[in-house]
Structure formats: structure tokens, C-alpha cells
Image: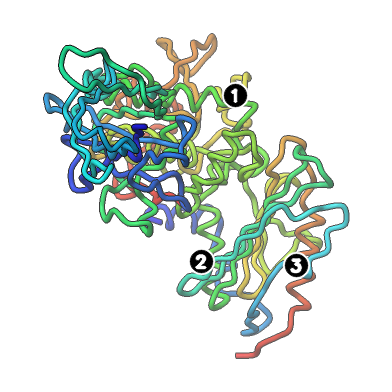
């Protein structure tokens, strides 16, 4: 991402108010996977795990039953630190063209910091992990519940204290 | 009995001036040389080769063919494929010719335009001049023609199974058909742009629900998933954004020898009403009013003086793009321009948004394919 775009995003999403904050101290989650994610009625179509230098990425696609019209894309990024996760969060926002994506601040919002658009896309960071839940099929599905399930999975993930 | 045992189209991996390009099928499957093998290859898609018009221009194009004979009395014959492969004499030693070079008649690259052809070659021999020709074999091939050696992300070297950036026939299957007949890079890129936009709404549609996020091009280009989508599979789903469209157009066009980039403009600008891919409603991109950024397939240095190809949206092409009525215009080979030029920038962004809708040539890239 270019310096100019990052500056624009930091201002647009008021990053000074949330970057590096939260994460319940310096808790770091390791070995995060979606294997324990229980999504009743949903079938995992595909899950790809890629390990890069500092980030492990899981990209997965889910469909409701045998339907190909109700599809969800769930991406998870396990970063080295809370700060790195928030940079990853900004990268994700930098891949969204919409000027209408807003921070979610209500008490049901997942993660330490979250952004969303209606209830069709949610992006959040919990500790050092970023999750993006999006529709990928033509029949729209609310994603808030799924995002909160993923967040609950992360909240109860075995801890590694730094 | 005389038989064709194998045919090499890409016998010289270091050049595309006299033979075929280095290609592979997709990210996981290589195309082995000889491309045609007896008993193994039946249908045209079992034997594929690609030629580039530019480097092959004016040169004889040849193939290498290995033949066998079970008749010990046959030692010297002439072989040809009428209208396709020039006749030449071959010798059998212990029933084998080894690989013998044959020149093509009117090779695909000599047609001078993009295309893909499935050909049936009827192989004939005769035992002496003035004798009649006898049919002895049929081979079938799929021949692609591109304008020039594919540009990045596609590579010609190293020619190894590990190089996943060798041009994919999975991509050429679409790109060569989309741009069929194109004789110039601009024409090829424009035809690819038109066909990508025409994929909406059934194959892909603009990602309104996800905030216009990238589903195929975040990081590398998930070309495998996109091809799956083109073939009716689930791919990465139905939604795309501008980065996806820019990446698809430039990657598919560059497979044909175009020289496009993916490059952004920004940051944060108000929009005129437009028709996003898959939509028939004139509105400001899902009704948002503004883009945080936009990305297109772009020529040259990706500046205001360079031309763009945008398969993500149609803009208003009339004399006043800020108001209805609208005349749909798919931006193809359209100069980006400066405010007031009534070029791409003015058609995309409102007068107030134009100063923030600036080319960002520092973002210029060609995403690798995976």
C-alpha cells in the first residue's frame, strides 16, 4: 500500500483512536484455525491456509447446504502482534472501494475494533487476529452472527502470554 | 504400417521466432513436449501450442515430428499434411525417423491476428515423386495465436514445471476467443475489457454487499478461482471489485501480448452516476456516492496522459457526465485526462471529486497469478 493511501485510510477511519489499542493487554493468539467453527447449516467448500513471514492467512468459502446462491467468504489473518493486526485491518480497508464502510461501535460489535457495511460485510480485529466475513453469493446473508461466532472462537482460543 | 509417434511444437524453449511459445495448462499442470504423443492424444485439447505473431513475423515456422514404420521395406518416403505441413523426405533407421523438422504452410501466426483453432491434420506419404499420396495418420491440435510474447505477470523463463507464471492455456482458452480477430494490442485489450464487463451479472457482479472489496486480487491474482468461476464453478464467489476487474483485464490481455498494468487512482472522490459491472441501474456505485480508491487496467506509465481500460463500470459518455440522460460508455483505450478534458477522470468523478481522483502511478503493478 502506498504511503498516500495509508495516510488517507488512517484519516478516513480515524486510526489514531484504535490502532495499537485493545487486544486485552499483549495477548497473542497462535495456531488459529476455523476447524472448531460451528456454523449450523453451513458447509465448508474450501479452506486454504498460507503462511507468510509474519502472517498466516486462512481463506475459506462456505455455502448454506447445497446451495450455491448463499455463500460466505471468511478470511482470517493471524498476525505477529496487535499492532500488526491493526495494520492488516487497514490493508483490508484499503481493498474496499466503498466510501460507506463505517466503524461498528455498538455493544454487539465483534472484536476490539470492527468495521462493517450494513449487515453484509464485517471486518474486525481481535488481539492479533483479523477476520473478514463477506457475502460471496447472490442471495445475501446477514454476517453479524457469523462474525460474532468467529469472535467467540478467538476469545476462547488458548492463550499465549507475551 | 507407418505412424506418427510424436510432434513437438515448442522444440526450442529459448525462442518464439520459429516455433511455439513456452506454455503450461494452469498453476498445477505443465504441458509436456512433445505436445502430441501417439495413443495419448486424441482430442485437440490434448495437444496445445501457442504462437506469437510479432516474433514469428516473416519467419518460417516449423515443428519436429517423429515417425515409425513396421514395414522393413520402407526406408525412404515423403511425408506431408496437405495445406498445413510442407512435404519433405524422411529416412527410417530401424523403423524410426527420430525427430525430423517440418515447415508449416501458412502457420497460424501468419494470420496476423488473435485466435484459437482446433485443427485436424491428415498425414500422407508417398514412396516416390509422382506416386500418389496415401493417408496414414490423423492428429488433432489446439493452436493459439497471440500478438506478441506474453508480458508480465507471464514469463517465458525459466521453462520449468516450477514456473507457474508461464502462460496458461486455461487463460488463453478465454483470452484468445474474447479477442479473436484483434490485430493490435489496443484492439485486443478493448475486446478483453468488453468481454469481462459482459460477464455481469450472471458470472460476476460488483461487490455492493462487501463494500467493493477484492475477492480475486487481494495480494496475488487468484486466477485459478476465476477460471473456475468462468467455467461455471463457485470460484471465489460472484462478487468482484475494481481491482479484480483491472487484474483480470490486464492479465488476460497481457497473455495476448498486451502491455497493461494494474494501477490505482485516489484517494476518496465523489462519483458521477455509473453502471457497475452486473448492474443495469445508473447510480453512484451502489449508492455510496464516493470511492475510497479505484483501480483500472492502464497503459504506459499510468499517468493522466495514458489510456485506461475499465471493465468494472460504464460511465456516462455524453457531453455532460454529471447529469442524466446517460449514454453508457465502457472505458477502453480512453485517456485518463485532467479535470475539464471530458476524458476518463471527468466521466468517473464529479467536478468536486476530480481533484482527489489522481493517477497513483506508484501503485502500478502486475499481480502474480496463482
**Residue in the picture at 65% in, 84% down:** A27
- In the image, B53 versus A97, the foreground residue is B53
Image location (x, y in percent) of residue A69: 76, 37
Disc 3 secondary structure class: helix
- For the N terminus of chain B, the image quarter is top left
Q: Chain of mark 1?
A: B
According to the image, label 3 marks what residue? A151
According to the image, label 2 marks what residue? A87
Q: Which mark is residue B200?
A: none
Query: Distance of mark 1 from mark 2, alpha carbons?
Result: 32 Å
Residue B153 visible in the picture: yes
Image location (x, y in percent) of residue B170: 47, 38
Image location (x, y in percent) of residue B102: 20, 31
Packing grade of label 2 (10 A; few <14, some 14-19, many >=20) is some
According to the image, label 1 marks what residue? B283
**Residue in the picture at 65% in, 27% down:** B202
Query: Distance of mark 2 from mark 3, alpha carbons?
Result: 19 Å
Amino acid at each position: 500500500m502506498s504511503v498516500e493511501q495509508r495516510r488517507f485510510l488512517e484519516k478516513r477511519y480515524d486510526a489514531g483512536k484504535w490502532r495499537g489499542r485493545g487486544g486485552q493487554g499483549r495477548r497473542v493468539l497462535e495456531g488459529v484455525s476455523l476447524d472448531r467453527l460451528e456454523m449450523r447449516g453451513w458447509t465448508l467448500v474450501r479452506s486454504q491456509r498460507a503462511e507468510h513471514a509474519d502472517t498466516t492467512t486462512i481463506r475459506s468459502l462456505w455455502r448454506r447446504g447445497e446451495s450455491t446462491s448463499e455463500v460466505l467468504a471468511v478470511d482470517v489473518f493471524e498476525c505477529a502482534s496487535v499492532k500488526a493486526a491493526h495494520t492488516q485491518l487497514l490493508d483490508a480497508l484499503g481493498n474496499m472501494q466503498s466510501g460507506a464502510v463505517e466503524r461498528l461501535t455498538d455493544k454487539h460489535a465483534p472484536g476490539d475494533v470492527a468495521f462493517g457495511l450494513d449487515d453484509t460485510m464485517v471486518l474486525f480485529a481481535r488481539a492479533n487476529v483479523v477476520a473478514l466475513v463477506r457475502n460471496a453469493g447472490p442471495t445475501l446473508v446477514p454476517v453479524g452472527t457469523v462474525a460474532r461466532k468467529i469472535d467467540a472462537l478467538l476469545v476462547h482460543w488458548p492463550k499465549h502470554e507475551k | 504400417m507407418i505412424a506418427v509417434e510424436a510432434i513437438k511444437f515448442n522444440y526450442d524453449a529459448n525462442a518464439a521466432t520459429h516455433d511455439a511459445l513456452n506454455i503450461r495448462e494452469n498453476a498445477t499442470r505443465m504441458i509436456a513436449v512433445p505436445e502430441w504423443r501417439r495413443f495419448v492424444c486424441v482430442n485437440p485439447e490434448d495437444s496445445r501450442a501457442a504462437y506469437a505473431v510479432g516474433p514469428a513475423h516473416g519467419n518460417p515456422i516449423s515443428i519436429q515430428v517423429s515417425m515409425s514404420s513396421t514395414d522393413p521395406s520402407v526406408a525412404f518416403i515423403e511425408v506431408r499434411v496437405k495445406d498445413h505441413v510442407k512435404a519433405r523426405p524422411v529416412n527410417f533407421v530401424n523403423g524410426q525417423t527420430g525427430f525430423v523438422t517440418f515447415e508449416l504452410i501458412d502457420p497460424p501466426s501468419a494470420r496476423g491476428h488473435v485466435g484459437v483453432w482446433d485443427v485436424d491434420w491428415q498425414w500422407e506419404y508417398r514412396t516416390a515423386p509422382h506416386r500418389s499420396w496415401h493417408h496414414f495418420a490423423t492428429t488433432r491440435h489446439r493452436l493459439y495465436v497471440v500478438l506478441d510474447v506474453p508480458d508480465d505477470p507471464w514469463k517465458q523463463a525459466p521453462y520449468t514445471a516450477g514456473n507457474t507464471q508461464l502462460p496458461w492455456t486455461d487463460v488463453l482458452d478465454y483470452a484468445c476467443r474474447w479477442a479473436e480477430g484483434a490485430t493490435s494490442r489496443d484492439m485486443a485489450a478493448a475486446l478483453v475489457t468488453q468481454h469481462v464487463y459482459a460477464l455481469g451479472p450472471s458470472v460476476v457482479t460488483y461487490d455492493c454487499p462487501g463494500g467493493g472489496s477484492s475477492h480475486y486480487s487481494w495480494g496475488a491474482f487468484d486466477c485459478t478461482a476465476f477460471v473456475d468461476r468462468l467455467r461455471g464453478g463457485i470460484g471465489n464467489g460472484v462478487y468482484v471489485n475494481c481491482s479484480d476487474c483491472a487484474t483480470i483485464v490486464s492479465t488476460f490481455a497481457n497473455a495476448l501480448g498486451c502491455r497493461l498494468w494494474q494501477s490505482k487512482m485516489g484517494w476518496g472522490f465523489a462519483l458521477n452516476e455509473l453502471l457497475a459491472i452486473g448492474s443495469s441501474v445508473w447510480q453512484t456505485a451502489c449508492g455510496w456516492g464516493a470511492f475510497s480508491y479505484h483501480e483500472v487496467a492502464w497503459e504506459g506509465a499510468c499517468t493522466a496522459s495514458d489510456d485506461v481500460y475499465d471493465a468494472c463500470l460504464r460511465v456516462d459518455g455524453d457531453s455532460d457526465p454529471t447529469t442524466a440522460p446517460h449514454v453508457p460508455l465502457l472505458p477502453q483505450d480512453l485517456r485518463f485526462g485532467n479535470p475539464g478534458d471530458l476524458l476518463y477522470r471527468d466521466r468517473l468523478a464529479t467536478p468536486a471529486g476530480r481533484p482527489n481522483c489522481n493517477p497513483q502511478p506508484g501503485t502500478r503493478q502486475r499481480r502474480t497469478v496463482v
